[in-house]
Image: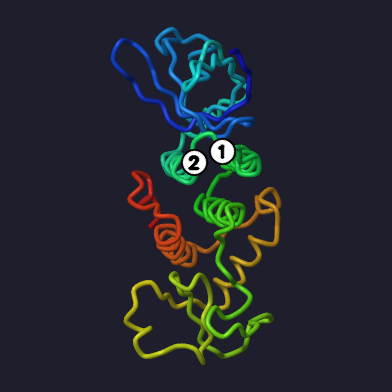
Amino acid sequence: MNVETEAIILRQTKTLGGRTMITMFTERYGKIGAGTSISEKSRSRSALALRPFCHGRYQLYKSRDSYSVTGAEVIESFYSLGEDVDKYLAASYALELTDAMLGEDVPQAVIYRLLKEFLGMMEKRKSSYDTLVIAYQLKALDVLGSGPQLKSCMRCGRVLEPLPKDEELRFSVEDGGLICAQCLSERDSLDPLIFDVDADIIQILSYMRDHSLSSLSGLAVPEASAARIRRILSAYISHHLGISNLKSEGFKI
């Protein structure tokens, strides 16, 4: 059966016999693996559309349990992501994380649109790349129903909005969100999955959650705060989604 769909290329792997395996995030079918005999050496329009980051339109042949790419054309190449090493690594992390988050053949239209928007924004961004990565992580977690709780204590349920003044709060990865001072125990101070958080970090995360990705184009989180948030979210994603040791994960952690 012949089908056509838009997709973003997440990964490309060379195989024996001159074929290439493509991991693609399609708009209609979710994440799928597809083989192709289109040679990248040809520098044809179809070959360019098979590179990671590319957003393209693809003609596929679907057999009983596999796909083959029979034709492809570029819609957006996001080529300039490769012109800045830090930008490239940040974007590569987003692709790798998305690949790890998605199951095979499960449509995820919201994350698909989110990733496409992220790549377009990252291509235009001049600095503070990790700000955009944090926003993408948080929004993808929310779409998957695994986002952290930022408005109440995870142990007693006490509402923490507005944030209480002069109270030390913690973020517990295992509990899935904030812990108020009254619920902290002595052993919590020894738990590597419980992090100190100040009002600035909580407000940054809440602001990102409450605003669309496109509206965050002018936001730049201070480097020290961004580094702390990335460590927290890395531990959170590892604990709740089982995703860790990504090749590109250390770009800012």
| Depicted 105 relative to depicted 171: above or below | above
- Residue 152: quadrant of the picture: bottom right
Residue shown at 43% from the left, 41% from the top: 96
Left/right of residue 75 with respect to residue 182 in the rendered view: right
The secondary structure type at the circle numbered 2 is: loop
| Depicted 241 relative to depicted 119: above or below | below
Q: Residue furthest left?
A: 16
Dot label at residue 204: none
Please name the residue that numbered disc 2 is placed on. 103
Residue 196: give x, y in percent of width and height. Answer: 44, 78
Contact check, label 1 and label 2, Cβ < 8 Å: yes
Q: Amino acid at mark 1?
A: Val
Residue shown at 50% from the left, 53% from the top: 130
- Residue 118: quadrant of the picture: top right
Q: Look at the image and tell me in which quarter the N terminus lies.
A: top right
Residue 230: give x, y in percent of width and height. Answer: 45, 60
Left/right of residue 234 with respect to residue 56 in the rendered view: left
Dot label at residue 106: 1
Q: Label 1 vs label 2: CA separation?
A: 6 Å
Out of 204 and 176, give the one closest to the viewer. 176
Q: Residues within 10 Å of mark 1 (few under 14, many from 20)?
A: some
Q: Look at the image and tell me in which quarter the C terminus lies.
A: bottom left
